[in-house]
Amino acid sequence: MRQSPANRILLLLKTEGPQRAASIGDVLGTTSEAARQHLTKLAEDGLVEPLTEPGSGRGRPGQLWHLTLAGNQTFPDGHAELTATLLSTMVKTLGRGALDTIISAREAETVKRYREEVSASDLALRIRQLTAIRTREGYMADSWMEEDGTFMLVENHCAICAAARACAGFCRSELETFRNVLGANVERSEHILLGARRCAYRISPL
């Protein structure tokens, strides 16, 4: 099904970060003015907003359009309110140890499931296999090799953001899962919960 221009803009800002109206117009195959009209409507709905582009210099300042919190929330978050409530109730009634036990069990199950698909001998291929899994699970993942030979795995959306906000153990668990499944050094360099627009992981061989 063909996406509307508004949905295409939201997806572009989600996956590629802040953009100029001209760049958005190029992606849509239209003029920057037409793109700006779509952006204005999205801004009226509270989904996007412009920021002055750093280093614009003299003359009319450039604008970079980015998603607002409401814009980010148009992407699925796995029943966020229910998830947060359940986790909070569990900690209150059973203690944090019970939640830690569940997170550990989830990690073990996830590692086992991922290893059924991430089985290549080559690290680059294992990363591509993991990227495909994470994209399928709603994380909008991408990966590539850097010039220094290390790899980057980025996730433009957090499909369990509500759970992660309620308990940082989920983020620690996912980092350990990546390390175990890839058999590599994995360090998080960007983190949605710390204000970044995405989670990013730098990967290198052991």
Image (cartoon, rainbow, N blue to C red):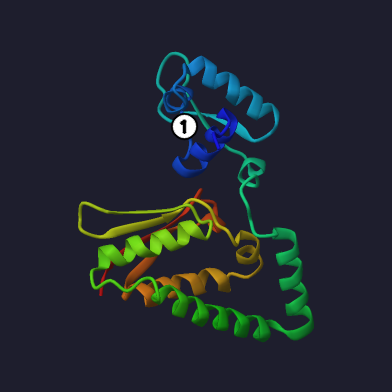
SS under mark 1:
loop
Residue drawn at the location 64% of the way across and 29% of the way down: 42
- How many marks overall? 1
Outermost residue, left side: 148
Looking at the image, residue 104 sits to the left or right of residue 98; the answer is left
Residue drawn at the location 67% of the way across and 42% of the way down: 70
| Relative depth, front residue between 6 and 16 | 6
Residue 119 versus residue 202 in the image, above or below: below
The picture quadrant where one finds residue 193 is: bottom right
Residue 3 versus residue 139 in the image, above or below: above
Estimate the x, y position of residue 93 in percent, counting from the top left.
Answer: 79, 82
Quarter of the image for the N terminus: give it.
top right
| Relative depth, front residue between 118 and 77 | 118
Quarter of the image for the C terminus: give it.
bottom left
Residue 65 versus residue 134 in the image, above or below: above
Query: As shown in the figure, which amino acid type bears the numbered disc 1?
Result: Gln
Estimate the x, y position of residue 137 in percent, counting from the top left.
Answer: 52, 60
The picture quadrant where one finds residue 130 is: bottom left
The residue that label 1 is drawn on is 19
Residue 104 versus residue 137 in the image, above or below: below
Looking at the image, residue 149 sits to the left or right of residue 169; the answer is left
Residue drawn at the location 62% of the way across and 23% of the way down: 40
Residue drawn at the location 69% of the way across and 27% of the way down: 44
